[in-house]
Image (cartoon, grey):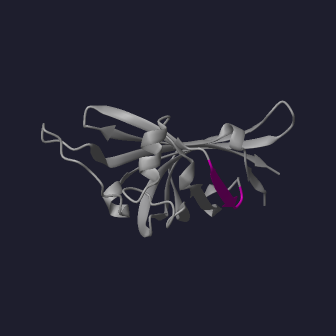
Amino acid sequence: MATWSLDKAHSELEFRIKHMMISTVKGLFDDFDVHVQGDPADLASLHVEVSIAVNSINTKNEQRDQHLRSEDFFNVGAFPKITFTSTQLTAKGGDDYTLEGELSIKGQTKAVKLNLENGGVAVDPWGNKKAGFTVKGEIKREDFGLTWNTVLETGGVMVSSDVKFEANIQFILT
């Protein structure tokens, strides 16, 4: 059984959402942790727990970030963390898997299915054994109590319902 340590220098968690229905705004969370237990040779055995510090949201616009931290959106004072706990990892073929689990945002917990790509295992030039994964998913933000919006003159809305996210994660295995 390996010990999985998140390599934060080589990991990122980003999201994308339509703004005014005409462009896409990207952001990321600067502070998150991923705990994995299981055998790297048997990915179906893996149990994954993710904790994201909502206050670390970063869209490269401080005014927007403050609005996202406010009660209109994440309400970080009452709900400082986003969490995910896996319930099942199923092979789809090749390096592709379905990662199922419980996602909790702003006090709302929902079952989600995510796409996981196993990037494999390699040894870096300093002898560290590394494992890499890409996880992609999409949620409806209203399902998690993120309901703020404004109707535009054109009939569209300020912020899309669909939030796409991608995590590129690397671990050090010992």
Q: How far across and down, in percent of the image, does residue 88 sit?
A: 53, 64
Magenta segment includes 34: yes
Q: How far across and down, in percent of the image, does residue 132 sit?
A: 65, 42
Q: How far across and down, in percent of the image, does residue 27 sit?
A: 48, 39
Establish if 109 lies above or below 138: below
* Depth check, front residue: 117 or 136: 136
Left-right relation of 124 to 54? right
The answer to whether residue 118 is visible is no
Which of the 4 image quarters holds residue 145? Answer: bottom left
Instruction: Determine the residue positioned at 50% across, 34% down.
Output: 60
The answer to whether residue 8 is visible is yes
Instruction: Determine the residue positioned at 54% across, 62% down.
Output: 80
Instruction: Determine the residue positioned at 83% across, 51% down.
Output: 174
Establish if 7 lies above or below 40: above
Which of the 4 image quarters holds residue 23? Answer: top left
In the image, the segment drawn in magenta is 31-39
* Depth check, front residue: 10 or 25: 25
Q: Main secondary structure of the magenta part?
A: strand
Q: How many marks?
A: 0
Q: How far across and down, in percent of the image, does residue 32 sit?
A: 62, 52
* Depth check, front residue: 29 or 3: 29
- Which quarter of the figure is the N terminus placed in? bottom right
Magenta segment includes 131: no
Left-right relation of 141 to 93? left
Instruction: Determine the residue positioned at 26% across, 37% down.
Output: 20
Instruction: State the residue lying farthest toward the right.
Output: 126
Left-right relation of 148 to 32? left
